[in-house]
Structure formats: C-alpha cells, structure tokens
Image (cartoon, rainbow, N blue to C red):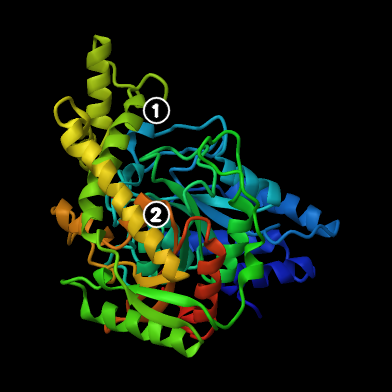
Amino acid sequence: MINLTDLTIKDAQSLLQAGEITSVDLTQAYLDRIAGIDDTLQAFLTVTADQALAQAQQADQRLAKGEHNPLLGVPLAYKDVLCTKGIQTTCGSKILEGYRPPYSARAIENLDAAGAVMLGKTNCDEFAMGSSTENSAYQVTHNPWDIERVPGGSSGGSAAAVAGRLAPGALGTDTGGSIRQPASLCGCVGLKPSYGRVSRYGLVAYASSLDQIGPFARTVEDVALILNVITGYDPQDSTSMNLPVPDYTAALTPDLKGVRVGVPKEYFIEGMQPAVEKIVRAAIDQMVALGAEVKEISLPHTDMALPVYYLIAPAEASANLARFEGQRYGPRISAGSMWDTYKQTRGEGFGPEVKRRIMLGTYALSTGYYDAYYLKAQKVRTLIKQDYDRAFEEVDVIACPVSPTTAFKIGERVDDPLQMYLSDVLSLAVNLAGICGISVPCGFDADDLPVGLQLLGPAFGEETILHTAYAYEQSTDWHTRVPEL
Ligand code: GLN
C-alpha cells in the first residue's frame, strides 16, 4: 500500500494522471495527517478542509476528462502573508485578525487555475519579520526534526509543513532569507526567485524592493513544477518582468560538467557552527565529483549586507505598515479621536518586533538622518550588487551555506534581536542584489539536524541554480530522509 503523504508532487501527479489515486484521496490523506500531527507542529494557522475537498473534487473531474497539468489535484499550503479570497489572512499579526481579502494573490490565482488544492494557510513571523517564526502573534511552530527547536523563519510554517509531510509543497516569501533559511533548518528545498520573476500582487508588503514569493517542496523537481506555475509577468505588479517563462523542469539534468562554481570566502564566517562548514564543503566536493569546476571567489562587501538590510527593510516596512490603522483592515480599537484610535489599534495590534522595525525605519528616513542612513545604505546596496555582477562574469553559480547554524532551540534567541538578525547574515545580500537562490538539503549535524547548501545564480538565472541543485540532490540521498513524528 502506498502512503499517499510520502509521495513527491511528481509521483503523485503520475498516479493522479493514471487514475490510480484521486485528488480527493490525496487531499484527505493530508487533511488526516494535519489533524493528527499539527497539534504538535503548529505549522498551520488555518486549515481549509471543506474548500480543499471541493477543489479536489473539481480537479478529479478535470483529470477524468484527460486534462494534463503537473499540479492538477495536488494539495499545497500557503504562507499567511499571501492574500486568499474570502479566507482569513493574518500575516501572523493580531492587527489583521479576521481579515478576509477580497482577492487572492496572483501566484495563488495561477495555482488555482492550474488545479492545485489549497490545504490552508501557514504560520509565519508577524509580517514576515523574523528568523524563527516565534514572532507570530498566534503560535510557535516546531521543527519536525526536533520539536524543541525552531523551524527557522519567517516562512517557518510552510517549511515545517513540507518537511513534516503535512503538504507536498508550499509557498513562502523571502525578503532576506525567509524561504532559504527555514528550508535549510527543516531539511527541504526552498527557492527564492529573482526580484521581478514572480508577481507580488496580493503579497502583503513587508519591504517592497526585496520581497519575493517562492516555492518549498521535498525535491528540486517539485520546486521547479511549482515555479513553472507562479512565474511570469503580471500587469498588476509594476516590478514583475515581462520575460519569457521557461519550463524549469527542462533544466534538470544530472551532471555538472563545465559548470563553474564559485565559493565566496566571506561566507565561511567566524562563529559558524563547524559542522555546517564541514558539511557544506563536502557538498562542494561532491559537485566537483559531478564535473563542476570549483574556485574560490571574493564578495568583498558581504559584511555590509546586515547593516544595509536593517536600514532598507525597516525603512520600507515603516511606510508599508502605515496602512494598518484600524480603518480599512482588521479590528479597530476605538478611542475617542481618530489619532487615539490609530494609536490604540496599532499599539495593541502590532507585536514588539514589528514596532521595533517601524521605529528603526522611521528614524532612518527622518530629516537629518535620511542621508546618513537610508541614502548611504542604498549606495552600499549598489556595491553589494556589483560584487555579484563581477562574480557572475567568472562563475555560473555561487555555493555557500544558508545559515551559520542548524536549527536553534525555541526561546534561545527571542530576547536578543541582534543574535536573531545574525541568523540571516548569509542570505540577506541576495535580496539586496535581486538575484536568485535555492537551499537544498546537504547533510545532518551530530544532533541529526539538517543543513542546507545555498546555490546562488544571477538575476533570472533560476534554470542554472535548479540544474545545479538537481544534479547535486540526485547524487545524494539527504532528501529521502524523513523526520520521525
Ligand atoms: N529574518 C529577516 C527579517 O527578519 C528576513 C525575513 C524575510 O525574509 N521575510 O527581516
């Protein structure tokens, strides 16, 4: 008997197409597993069981008519910063409790049209600000490999759901590492597309010049299948690029002959967990065995990424979050005058990390400080981008760790924001430069916690990183390990 929740998207699709399983069976199997295990993992904020079964029935009808589409009838989970028509979308914040958007994000509309089934909405750090999902106003998500540890963040619910086999694939968002870091910490695959590759329409904005939506799954091929559907130009996102959309699965070939891989010396930092470095270096050796040409490179402005990100992202957030004042969305706490109502609603609705970011951002943008902080950060951002531009003249792909450590204990970093920010020291620069990156499982530390290999490509170089990640993945069995739950 096949265990339906063990199937990859690719395998489930073959069985669906052959009529050997139905989407209703598959969806019910996931709903049952969510009902059994999500009390422990707390990956979902909302489970949309009835709607999921209705969508699955429709998918079965389309399958019965012989329709071919790789995601037809496949259940997926969506991070709760993505608008879903008529379904509560909280962004992990009390300020949006009960908010039901009048439309769905473009990426989700595309998935709906392809016949994917929504299982529910996943937990995340409030407005995607965080690295552990502990900043959610609702619940703490647990890492499937060790439930005393965090799943990473901010898309921790999506990563835990995929790793814990509560969904075969999911969507997350990545502003400074929020897809790649939780994928690394949960031992699944996560891809951050280039800026402009996926429409941000219907993604509740955190830092608009950095945010991108991207897929999680258990294999590189499954990630490519989801990317195929969510990618493309959208007139409703003026920053989405009008470029041809390739079939990303066509890039997935098993050897790395002639692929030039750069290993940036600045990405093996002091304080990194020695096991992470050892495991990532072994993965790079494996890429050599597959035919890659590896050389050391330098990205000299790497250490500027953290301070630059923590000026630009909060600056944009402080503007984006001004819209939440209790008039248009979510609960309102009335307090006499309009200004008092704003103060009361925002004071009670936002959590401490969101308030810290709004204050940081407002400060960086204020008269007298704008030039010293925000403007200077933008100039250094250009230098960071130029580092990558130069590197990609010499190499096709950059290989490095995603996170300096494996999953940390719940509660360990919550009282130390700087320590938490350092979780993303190896992932932030990618968003500042607008390039693409993927995390693929590459081993386990002595505590049996997963480690991710980060592969970076130039803007719109998704095919290259998918190819490299696929060839590496297929030569290992890390992606086949299952956490005991
Ligand atoms: N951890 C980073 C932050 O808190 C990145 C979050 C993200 O990518 N959404 O801002």
Q: Quadrant location of the N terminus? A: bottom right
Amino acid tagged 2: Ser
- In which image quadrant can residue 302 be found? bottom left
- In which image quadrant can residue 463 be found? bottom right
Q: Where is residue 165 shown, x and y percent of the image?
A: 50, 67
Distance CA(mark 1)–CA(mark 2) = 22 Å
Q: Closer to the observer: label 1 or label 2?
A: 2
Label 1 near ligand 1 (CB < 8 Å): no
- Which residue corresponds to mark 1? 330
The kind of secondary structure element at disc 2 is: loop
Residue 470 drawn above or below residue 353 = below
| Of callouts 1 and 2, the N-terminal one | 2
Q: Where is residue 304 shown, x and y percent of the image?
A: 22, 54
Amino acid tagged 1: Gly
Q: Residue at x 57, y 83 (%)?
A: 255
- The reply to whether residue 40 is visible in this rendering is no
Left or right relative to 145: residue 36? right
The circle on residue 155 is: 2
Q: Where is residue 352 shown, x and y percent of the image?
A: 20, 40
Q: Foreground residue, 344 or 425?
A: 425
Left or right relative to 471: residue 206? left
Q: Foreground residue, 339 or 224?
A: 224
The kind of secondary structure element at disc 1 is: loop
Q: Residue furthest top?
A: 337
Label 2 near ligand 1 (CB < 8 Å): yes
Q: Quadrant location of the C terminus? A: bottom left
Q: Residue at x 36, y 86 (%)?
A: 282
Residue 40 drawn above or below residue 275 = above
